[in-house]
């Protein structure tokens, strides 16, 4: 069960307690049959949200199952503690699935986080499922490169520590930021992202979940 703290200190204590439980070496499933994308959309007031999970066949990228949950953010907006806003709704949506995903692909970060415990780590630990984070923009780190061709990558470094990879999923387009969350290694995480992104910058899991949560948010808001 997810713990929703009431203060920043309590939230950081939860992260500190759960962080050692994250398995950052995996190796994780190398050929998962079902992969879930998770995303959250917010209303203009920043409080109402819709969380979506889409389960895809990892080979065909056909959508096998979807689930959504709507509500309000469970925690204030605090950098480094953003996962606490979204976790209850995401866990509710996951519980509504009828097809079990073998891998969770989060629109966000895992290890590549200021406190080394982003959404992908938190969800992975709470569900004990393999999880990775794929971010559109970085929270932490510096990098050089990668080259312009698909599959090229560069280490995402926070000081001397590698916290993820900057991965080019399509020739000549902006890269994404991949980090492990739970029960996966970084090589495998990047391989799965490339497998799920045959045509576009973002994995199809993320694209489908983004569309679903935005559609649901419009219905929830009565638009």
Image (tube, rainbow, N blue to C red):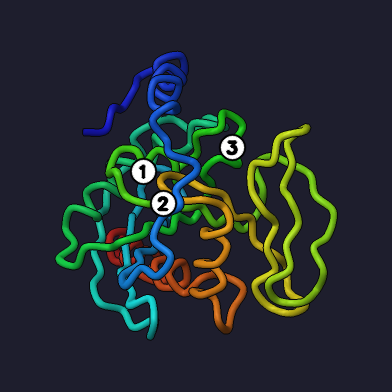
Residue in the image at 35% along x and 19% along y: 6
Tag in front: 3 or 2: 2
Across and down, in percent, residue 102 comes to 30, 61
Point out which mark residue 111 bears.
none
Q: Residue furthest top?
A: 9
Q: Position of residue 78 (x, y in %)?
A: 52, 30
Query: Left or right of 209: which side holds 197?
Result: right
Q: Residue at x 19, y 67 (%)?
A: 99
Residue 53 picture quarter:
bottom left
Along the polypeptide, which appears first: circle 3 or circle 1?
3
Say few, some or many: other residues with alpha carbon within 10 Å of mark 1 (under 14 / 14 to 19 / 20 or more). many
Task: Work out how far the residue at label 1 is from the one at label 2, CA to CA, in angstroms.
Answer: 7 Å
Q: Is residue 123 left or right of residue 82?
A: left
Cβ–Cβ under 8 Å for marks 1 and 2: yes
The image position of residue 186, as x and y in percent, is: 57, 52
Q: Name the residue under label 2.
A: 131
Front-lying residue, 127 or 1: 127
**Which secondary structure, mark 3?**
loop
Q: How far apart are marks 3 and 2 (CA)?
A: 15 Å
Residue 189 rendering spot, x and y as whole percentages: 52, 58
Question: Which numbered tag is attached to residue 113?
Answer: 3
> Of tags 1 and 2, which is closer to the observer?
2
Q: How many labels does the image show?
A: 3
The answer to which of 135 and 223 lies nearer the viewer is 135
Q: What element carries label 2?
A: strand
Name the residue: 59% across, 79% down: 200
For marks 3 and 1, give the CA distance.
Answer: 14 Å
Query: Which residue is labeled 1 in the image?
Result: 123
The answer to whether 124 is drawn above or below residue 152 in the figure is above
């Amino acid at each position: 069960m997810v713990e929703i703290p009431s203060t920043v200190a309590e939230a950081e204590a939860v992260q500190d307690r759960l962080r050692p439980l994250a398995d950052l070496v995996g190796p994780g499933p190398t050929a998962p049959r079902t992969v879930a994308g998770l995303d959250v959309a917010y209303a203009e007031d920043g409080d109402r949200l819709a969380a979506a999970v889409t389960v895809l066949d990892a080979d065909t990228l056909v959508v096998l199952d979807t689930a959504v949950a709507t509500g309000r953010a469970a925690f204030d907006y605090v950098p480094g503690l953003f996962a606490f806003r979204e976790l209850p709704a995401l866990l509710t949506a996951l519980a509504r699935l009828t097809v079990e995903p073998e891998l969770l692909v989060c629109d966000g970060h895992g290890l590549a986080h200021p406190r080394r415990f982003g959404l992908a780590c938190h969800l992975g630990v709470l569900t004990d499922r393999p999880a990775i984070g794929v971010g559109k923009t970085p929270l932490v780190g510096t990098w050089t490169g990668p080259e312009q061709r698909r599959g090229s990558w560069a280490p995402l470094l926070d000081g001397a520590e590698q916290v993820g990879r900057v991965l080019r999923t399509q020739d000549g387009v902006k890269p994404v930021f991949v980090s492990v969350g739970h029960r996966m290694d970084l090589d495998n995480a990047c391989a799965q992202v490339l497998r799920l992104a045959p045509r576009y910058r973002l994995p199809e899991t993320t694209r489908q979940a983004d569309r679903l949560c935005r559609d649901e948010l419009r219905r929830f808001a009565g638009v």
